[in-house]
Amino acid sequence: MNKMEVKEKIKGKVVKKEQAQKVTYIFQSDEDFDILIEASKGQEFVIYHYGKDCGGKIKILLKGEDASVCYHYNTVNIHDNQVQVEVLHQDKNTISNLYFHGYNREENKLTFQVDVVIPKKMVGVKANQENRIYNRKNGISFILPNLYVDEYDVEANHASYIGPFDNELKFYMKTRGLREDVIERLLLEGLLIKEGLTEEEKLSFIES
Amino acid sequence: MLEIKELNVITTDIGKEILKDFSLSIQEGEIHAIMGPNGTGKSTLSKVIFHHPAYQITKGKMTFEGVDITDKETDEIGRMGLFLCMQDPLVIEGVTTSDFLREALYEKTKERVDLYHFVKEIGTGVKKLSLDENVIHQALNQGLSGGEKKKSEILQMLLLKPKFIILDELDSGLDVDSLKEVCKIINEYLKENPKTAVLMITHYSRILEYIHPLFVHKMVDGKIVETGDFHLAHKIEMEGYQVVEKTLGEADE
Ligand SMILES: Nc1ncnc2c1ncn2[C@@H]1O[C@H](COP(=O)(O)OP(=O)(O)OP(=O)(O)O)[C@@H](O)[C@H]1O
Ligand SMILES: [Mg+2]
């Protein structure tokens, strides 16, 4: 069975689009979440999750061959928050693509802990993650990617960045006459807004 | 139009001296070219005009249309109508060319951009420059080759309609035919906007055959050491910069 279970409440609407073997979920959360995703053979999950100053747990079980999950988590962080992600590749040729992006607005702590487990014999697995946190002030951010790989025939990549927005980039944008606040907004939208939000939702998310 | 007077510039971090007593005066409608060896401070000059935070002006001043811009912020200078076509344009992830330019136009004019005209104008620009139509809706400069990035700079120039254009090595990255095309487009722009002035930075005289400078300046070691017309460019290309540096050295002794 193919399912996504949200153990604790997610605020706002959950948009669900089903298309043959592919299910897309788009939702926002503003309190701590506990999410379980189970993907069976051939199933594909695409998630756009917008978190407003919250944290929680995300467990992804890839239970059948060729199951795949693409998870985009985008958050504006204000207080101390931690997001704990656990991905278990329980069958061959399963795919996980994780994009965890955060904007740490105040001087608090934002942590992404991402554990990916690939046991022996799970050949052909692909596990990618790209995590980024931009600190606006002197916030403390952590990205803790852990890969537990027991099989050789797999493809695993991870990239992470923690820091401020690049000064050269800001200079380039400023030469075109853009003000600092406009630049921040554009870069934030670029970092955090991926799909499924209306113009209003975008604004309220960025300005939260 | 742009007056730079006896500018001394050091890097903000370690205080390395880059521009020394640098002076340059450019009037409305004039085209100037600066040629100089690697590392002499040409790109630095272009960034200093835009108040890049990595550099500090320790002496001298700059004015644009009579307004002192020595201490003005980068974005203000941009809104005054100066445009910098960068030697190595950056990629702005997540921000589309279209969104970027619309915001920039709004900042400059403070009028909401008429979408119909904007779409038409950007479309015309893209076609003129033989860029892929998709660049409009892709992140700015993402996935573009070196030459395409230069074209993307010129696309921005066409939309922002500057009064003063700095071209930092426009010719690097562009193939022979593209360079010709792009220069033609710039010339058309200058014909339509005859008061616009240009400062070109280049290593080769080829681009100067397409965009004719009124003055050519030879820059060595952070300052202009010789000014002439188009012929100076050829002379530099024949003789290199070494000669000048040597004669300067001898003169010092
Ligand atoms: N931010 C900086 N910090 C330290 N040194 C710098 C900085 N910017 C420039 N420089 C140095 O200043 C000198 C001038 O650099 P610049 O980029 O202006 O040269 P250029 O004339 O444009 O050279 P090229 O023809 O290779 O483009 C170089 O030696 C460079 O290393
Ligand atoms: Mg340079």
Image (cartoon, coloured by chain):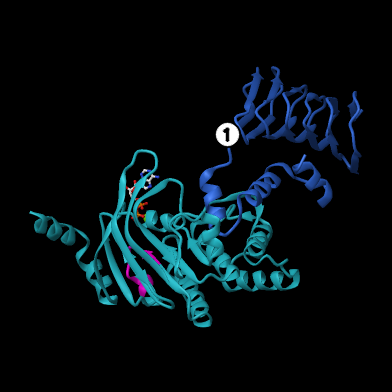
Q: Residue at x 68, y 48 (%)?
A: A185
The three-letter code of the residue at mark 1 reads Gly
Could you tell me residue A72's position as x and y percent? Answer: 75, 37
Toward the front, the furthest residue is: B67
Q: Is residue A145 magenta?
A: no
Q: Tell me the cyan chain.
A: B
Rendered-image quadrant of the C terminus of chain B: bottom left
Q: Colour of chain A?
A: blue
Could you tell me residue A200's position as x and y percent? Answer: 83, 50
**Label 1 CB sits under 8 Å from any ligand 1 atom:** no
Marks counted in the figure total 1
The magenta stretch is: B200-208
Q: Residue at x 53, y 82 (%)?
A: B192
| Residue A196 visible in this rendered orientation of the protein | no
In the displayed structure, B105 sits above or below A33; it is below
Dot 1 crowding, Cα within 10 Å, few <14, some 14–19, many 20+: some
| Residue A202 visible in this rendered orientation of the protein | yes
Chain letter behind tag 1 = A
Circle 1: element type: strand
In the displayed structure, B80 sits above or below B191; it is above
